[in-house]
Image (spheres, rainbow, N blue to C red):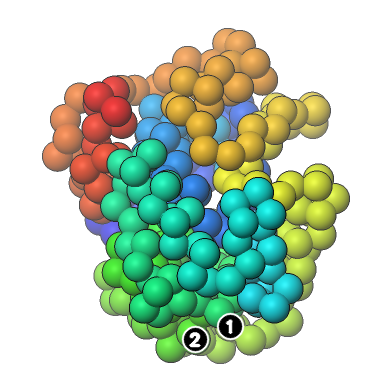
């Protein structure tokens, strides 16, 4: 992470924000990855006017108990076509062959690792989630394996020493605090009855909010935002692809297209 990116992230997290967003997702959710162009664009354009936190859904506890009747998925091989659909619909690069060559056994380990990174800071959680998603979505890594999750943390700690302490991450990965944070997320998911991801609740502090579920275009996301806060306006627009890539410390081509309103 660059110094500029760190400064921008710090500013976002420290602002009170007009709208609060809870983002329900899972590192193994292909539709959440497909939604990254819209989600990144929103955070960039409304920087300082929104604040957010991630809730881990625990989408796949294991394959003996997982079933998605809507997509006819009950075993790893059947997940490949779903990822292929997300790839073609969204334009995001997705390594759908992971379900044939190197299928993750569960999403729980990655969810737990995500909560573990969040014990250090919201910025660490933000960047760790992105890196662990890249590991599986772009590189076909099995993120149900602890060695892969530790490798992602190690790489992030070396990239941004101020952001993530690897020794602390490794120590806390099996600790009670991270586990309790994940359990709390699972309770919230069940309480709201959320079964599709990504899912976002948008609200003003202390007021009832709105829920938006599934892969949606940017216009639908902004429309929901304005229903919650009619007065909200973008803080900026992206005009330079190089600057946008620098802000995020790397973007996909599809993410740049979305930010330029070409997608």
- Position of residue 150 relative to residue 34, above or below, is below
Locate the C terminus and report the quarter of the image it occupies: top left
Left or right: residue 112 versus residue 132 is: right
Q: Earlier in the sequence, mark 1 or mark 2?
A: 2
The one nearer the camera, 85 or 233, is 85
Q: Residues within 10 Å of mark 2 (few under 14, many from 20)?
A: some
Residue 232 image point, x, y percent: 54, 16
Residue 111 image point, x, y percent: 59, 69
Which image quadrant for residue 208?
top right
Residue 173: mark in rendering? 1
Q: Secondary structure at mark 1?
A: loop
Q: Secondary structure at mark 2?
A: helix
Residue 134 image point, x, y percent: 35, 63
Q: What residue is rendered at 56% in x and 88% in y? A: 171
Residue 174 image point, x, y percent: 63, 86
Q: Name the residue carrying label 2.
A: 146
Q: Residues within 10 Å of mark 1 (few under 14, many from 20)?
A: many
Q: What residue is rendered at 50% in x and 77% in y? A: 104
Q: What residue is rendered at 60% in x and 83% in y? A: 172
- Position of residue 1 relative to residue 98, above or below, is above
Q: What residue is rendered at 55% in x and 79% in y? A: 105
Is the C-beta separation of discs 1 and 2 under 8 Å? yes
The one nearer the camera, 221 or 1, is 221
How far apart are the two marked residues, 1 and 2, measured between alpha carbons? Answer: 9 Å
């Amino acid at each position: 992470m660059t110094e500029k990116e760190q400064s921008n992230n710090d500013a976002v997290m420290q602002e009170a924000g007009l709208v609060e967003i809870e983002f329900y997702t899972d590192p193994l959710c292909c539709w959440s990855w497909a939604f990254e162009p819209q989600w990144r664009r929103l955070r960039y354009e409304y920087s300082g006017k929104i604040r957010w936190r991630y809730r881990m859904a625990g989408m796949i506890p294991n394959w003996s108990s997982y079933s998605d009747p809507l997509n006819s998925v009950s075993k790893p091989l059947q997940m490949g076509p779903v990822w292929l659909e997300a790839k073609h619909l969204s334009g995001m690069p997705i390594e759908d062959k992971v379900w044939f060559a190197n299928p993750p056994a569960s999403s729980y380990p990655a969810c737990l690792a995500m909560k573990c990174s969040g014990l250090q800071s919201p910025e660490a959680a933000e960047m760790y989630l992105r890196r662990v998603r890249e590991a599986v979505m772009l590189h076909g890594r099995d993120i149900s394996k602890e060695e892969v999750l530790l490798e992602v943390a190690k790489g992030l700690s070396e990239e941004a020493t101020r952001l993530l302490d690897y020794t602390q991450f490794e120590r806390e990965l099996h600790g009670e605090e991270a586990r309790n944070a994940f359990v709390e997320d699972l309770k919230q998911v069940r309480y709201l009855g959320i079964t599709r991801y990504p899912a976002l609740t948008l609200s003003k502090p202390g007021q009832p909010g709105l829920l938006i579920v599934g892969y949606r275009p940017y216009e639908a996301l902004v429309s929901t935002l304005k229903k919650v806060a009619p007065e909200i306006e973008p803080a900026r627009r992206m005009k330079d692809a190089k600057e946008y890539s620098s802000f995020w410390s790397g973007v996909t081509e599809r993410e740049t297209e979305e930010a330029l309103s070409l997608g």
